[in-house]
Amino acid sequence: MRNRLVRPAAIFLAAAALFVAPLPANAAQQSWSDPSGDTNNTGLLDIGKVTVTNSKKQFGATFRVPAFDDARPFGSVELWLDTDAKKSGPEFLYSAGFPGESGFYTVKKWRINKTWFNVAGESKCGKAVKERFDLDNGVIGIKVKRTKGCTGAPKRVRVYARTTATGQYSDDDYSDYVDYDRKENDFYPAYKKFSPWVRR
Ligand SMILES: [Ca+2]
């Protein structure tokens, strides 16, 4: 059994180390900005800069939200990766809940197909995925190592990012919970739409 978010501090450090590696010469990376202030409440999960990376060895996406201060959202984040223009919808989903666990899945027609990892465990393909869940710096993302029998060999990648908050804890120890009157969403670039393709 493996809960990837069970010891967040350790994971943040490991992920941060992986993410500072310089991009190889053949890597493509593109960033875009989602407007800030476009959510209907406190904006704890207001999506800002979104980045897609696509290289010979790996592909992935990250997005920024405001760096966490004291308040903590109750909700979830999702990164949907589209890697095949010929197939309807995205091929991969990373999702993480606040507070709680994360998972990575293959997707067919917007529905979860296979689980690479979640709170219950990890498959062989799950080892290809590195999470970054760095709330203190407001960065959430994944990198997927190209792996035979798991990722295929996508040439281009694009992302759809979504956040949902249904309430918040006013304290960083997850106390003093307040439920929002209505759900607060943010989408990049829009509901079930994708960024431009990034070719490697
Ligand atoms: Ca936004």
Image (spheres, rainbow, N blue to C red):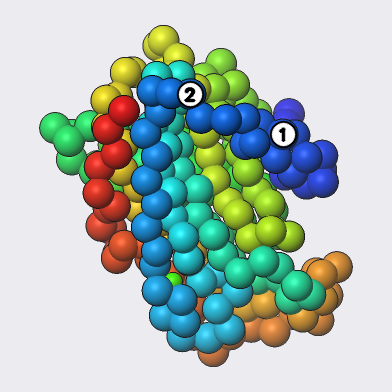
Task: Identify the residue shown where x is 43% and y is 23%.
Answer: 25
Residue 166 showing in the rendered view: no
Mark 1 closeness class: few <14, some 14–19, many ≥20 residues within 10 Å: few
Task: Identify the residue shown where x is 22% and y is 32%.
Answer: 84
Q: What element carries label 1?
A: helix
- The residue that mark 1 highlights is 17
Seen from the viewer's position, the closer of residues 186 and 168 is 186
Residue 184 showing in the rendered view: yes
User: Amino acid under label 2?
Assistant: Pro
Q: Are marks 1 and 2 in contact (CB under 8 Å)?
A: no
Q: What element carries label 2?
A: loop
Q: Give the side of residue 34 with respect to residue 11, left or right.
A: left
Q: Quick one: quadrant of the C terminus? A: top left
Mark in the foreground, 1 or 2: 2
Seen from the viewer's position, the closer of residues 187 and 100 is 187
User: Amino acid under label 1?
Assistant: Ala
- The residue that mark 2 highlights is 24
Q: Which quadrant of the figure has residue 35?
A: bottom left
Q: Quick one: quadrant of the N terminus? A: top right
